[in-house]
Image (cartoon, rainbow, N blue to C red):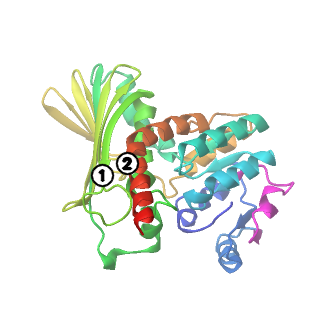
């Protein structure tokens, strides 16, 4: 494991030593004392402060990259060069060309690349997919995503929030977080073929977008839309699939009951998440390495999501770049 910070503490780290036929052999963090502390508490045999000690270790079969998004590209290329299979956190990289290069590098080295869109292996999303595929709501017409968040105030600031909002580290709150939702739409309904979107900085609290609206057309012929505001006065998030004979509403971020509405009547299906939400995905990776299964979140599926993200925020990013260059020239 390269990086053993917040995400590795509960969500992912324990899954590597709790999955069947899996062992977590070594962890790395640039702060060696923190790496040693993680290794001690999780009973990991080795720790280091140099990624090469893991990348070039003969007894390590695959590597999990759990660093901030700004270093995903570099570490993935280094793992690919060493012919080590890679499981990288999402977003897979900050720029679309980096994502493409990561996929191509792993393909050229003949090693698999998996991306941590772990919701593809959670039971509640598998249940939504089964409902859709079984025709529970008839032919799918469209899907909607909606997320409103209050703008953080100074007392809310944490390191985790700060790096997510930083364009150079996490890409911004929208970019860092919405990949899960877009990937789930791909998982449920197939690839998104076309995107039309607007993004802006209405509140102006950071350099990144705080409001986004987008419309999609899926290759299947279904349509979709998304609305996100990170400077609102309320907290709300849900996704909905609308069919010819009903709807399915669920949350991307919370394990709340799935609500299926047909003929004016609703039923709720409660399905919780496991203690370590990455563990089902980790198990699928271990099984694939052992020739016993297949992980559903690959570099190729994640690249589709990266392309959609780029289509949504690309124009905004370009305008921001021009604005900064203009401001610099005036100074």
The percent coordinates of residue 186 (x first, y second) are: 44, 33
For residue 127, side relative to residue 231 (left or right):
right
The percent coordinates of residue 73 (x first, y second) are: 64, 51
| Cα–Cα span, label 1 and label 2 | 7 Å
Query: In the rendered structure, which segment of residues is drawn in magenta?
Result: 46-63
Could you tell me which secondary element the residue under label 1 belongs to? strand
Residue 281, magenta (yes or no): no
Whether label 1 touches label 2, CB < 8 Å? yes
Viewer-proximal residue, 292 or 322? 322
10 Å crowding of disc 2: few (<14), some (14-19), many (20+): some
Q: Is any part of residue 287 visible from this angle?
A: yes
- Name which quarter of the figure residue 155 lies in: bottom left
Q: Earlier in the sequence, mark 1 or mark 2?
A: 1
- Mark 2 lies on residue: 316
In the rendered image, the quadrant that contains the N terminus is: bottom right
Query: On residue 200, which mark appears?
Result: 1
Name the outermost residue toward the right. 58
- Looking at the image, which residue is at 73% across and 45% down? 85
The percent coordinates of residue 151 (x first, y second) are: 27, 65
- Looking at the image, which residue is at 52% across and 50% down? 91
């Amino acid at each position: 494991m390269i990086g053993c910070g917040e995400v590795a503490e509960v969500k992912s780290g324990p899954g590597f030593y709790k999955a069947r036929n899996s062992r977590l052999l070594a962890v790395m963090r640039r702060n060696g004392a923190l790496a040693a502390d993680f290794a001690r508490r999780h009973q990991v045999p080795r720790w280091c402060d140099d990624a090469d000690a893991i990348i070039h270790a003969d007894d390590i079969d695959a590597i999990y990259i759990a660093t901030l998004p700004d270093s995903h590209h570099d570490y993935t290329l280094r793992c690919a060069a060493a012919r080590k299979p890679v499981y990288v956190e999402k977003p897979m990289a900050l720029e679309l060309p980096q994502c493409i290069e990561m996929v191509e590098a792993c393909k050229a080295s003949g090693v698999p690349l998996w991306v941590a869109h772990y919701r593809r292996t959670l039971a509640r999303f598998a249940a939504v997919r089964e409902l859709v595929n079984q025709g529970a709501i008839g032919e799918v017409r469209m899907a909607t995503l909606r997320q409103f968040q209050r703008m953080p105030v100074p007392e809310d600031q944490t390191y985790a929030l700060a790096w997510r909002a930083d364009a150079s580290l996490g890409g911004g709150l929208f970019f860092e977080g919405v990949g899960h939702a877009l990937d789930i739409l791909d998982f449920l309904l197939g690839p998104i073929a076309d995107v039309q979107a607007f993004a802006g900085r209405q509140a102006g609290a950071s350099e990144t977008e705080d409001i986004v609206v987008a419309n999609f057309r899926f290759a299947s012929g279904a349509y979709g839309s998304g609305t996100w505001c990170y400077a609102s006065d309320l907290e709300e998030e849900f996704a909905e699939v609308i069919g010819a004979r009903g709807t399915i509403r669920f949350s991307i971020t919370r394990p709340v009951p799935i609500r299926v509405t047909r003929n004016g009547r609703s039923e709720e299906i409660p399905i919780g998440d496991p203690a370590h939400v990455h563990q089902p995905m980790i198990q699928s990776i271990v099984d694939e390495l052992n020739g016993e299964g297949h992980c559903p979140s690959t570099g190729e599926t994640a690249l589709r999501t990266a392309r959609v993200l780029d289509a949504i925020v690309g124009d905004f990013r370009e305008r921001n770049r021009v604005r900064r260059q203009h401001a610099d020239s005036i100074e």
